[in-house]
Amino acid sequence: VQLQASGGGLVQPGGSLRLSCAASGFTLENYAIAWFRQAPGKEREGVSCISGRAGSTYYADSVKGRFTISRDNSKNMVYLQMNSPKPEDTAVYYCATGLWVIVTRWGSPDEYDYWGQGTQVTVSS
């Protein structure tokens, strides 16, 4: 099982950016996939999650209405579309998956067994 996050970079406040998470070694649509982020000096926090099969989506309150998680089963990819980012969204973003994620606990890093390497997102003018 491998996850590889990409798409990070420098983006201006109010702009847009799309992060990608490529999965290999398993069929992504059968498992929950989440995006987390970690800013310097802060704990890792859940940003968004898409559940397996049904594809239900979940968001942290801080990004609700601005970020959108989606999945392309044919490509085994998950995306995080970041619209109207703010400077406080600056962090390293990780994608993660787990064998038995309880979706009511989707925001807990302990639910996930496999992590991508992270991609830096910097929101600044």
Image (cartoon, helix red, strand yellow):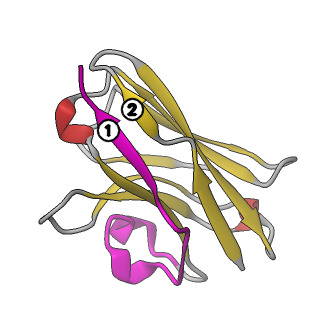
The percent position of residue 63, horizontal first and vertical second, equals 29, 37
Residue sitting at x 36%, y 55%: 92
- Mark 2, other Cα within 10 Å: few <14 / some 14–19 / many ≥20: few
In this rendered view, identify the residue nearer to me: 71 or 16. 16
Q: Over which residues does the magenta segment extend?
A: 101-125
- Name the residue carrying label 1: 122
Residue extending furthest top? 14
Instruction: Give residue 94's mark.
Output: none
Residue placed farthest to the left in the image?
Answer: 41
User: As displayed, is residue 64 above or below residue 110?
Assistant: above
Residue carrying label 2: 10
Check the picture and name the quadrant holding the C terminus: top left
Q: Residue 36: image x %, image y %?
A: 38, 59
Number of on-image labels: 2
79 relative to 83 in the view: left or right: right
Q: CA distance from mark 1 to mark 2?
A: 5 Å
User: Do we see residue 62 in this rendering?
Assistant: no
The residue located at (80%, 67%) in the rendering is 27
> In this image, 74 relative to 30: left or right?
right
